[in-house]
Image (cartoon, rainbow, N blue to C red):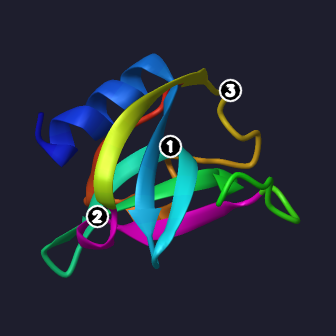
Amino acid sequence: MSSNKLLLEAIALRKCVTAIYNRGTVKLAPHILYTRHDELFIDAVTVSRDGKPPREIKIGTFKLAGLNDLALDDAFFEPEPGFDAADEKYAGVALFAVQR
């Protein structure tokens, strides 16, 4: 399954994904897939990094090309209350976003 298709499925079903990012294992809750400078990005909440929860819950930006061994996880997530798909940052570039 392509990374794009996998991420679309994860966003639609509110399922987490796992990947190797910066030589570490991350579990992410992807909220939106979008383009910037002709590259694909996701904004996601990091659920865990190398098996440990993050110090703070926040939405981070991940370049799709930097996420290796991307896979669907069985864990579901609730959209982060502060996430806004209508944010100016996503205007005209959003491909798919989590629905509330």
- The mark found on residue 64 in the picture is 2
Question: Are the residues at dot 1 and dot 3 in contact (C-beta closer than 8 Å)?
Answer: no
Q: Residue furthest right?
A: 55
- Give the residue displayed 64% in from the left and 27% down from the top: 77
Pick the front one: 79 or 48: 48
Magenta-drawn segment: 58-67
Looking at the image, tell me whether mark 2 or mark 1 is earlier in sequence order. 1
Residue shown at the point (38%, 31%) measured from the top left? 72
Q: Position of residue 61 (x, y in %)?
A: 50, 69
The quadrant of the rendering that contains the C terminus is top right
Would you call the spot at circle 1 few (<14 residues within 10 Å), some (14-19), or many (20 or more)? Answer: many
Judge whether 84 appears above or below 73 on screen: below
User: How would you rate the neighbour count of disc 3 (Cα within 10 Å): few for under 14, some for 14-19, many for 20 or more?
Assistant: few
Mark carried by residue 78: 3
Element assignment for label 3: loop
Magenta-colored stretch includes residue 97 = no
Q: Amino acid at mark 3?
A: Glu
Query: Is residue 66 depicted above or below 13 in this figure?
Result: below
Amino acid type shown at disc 1? His
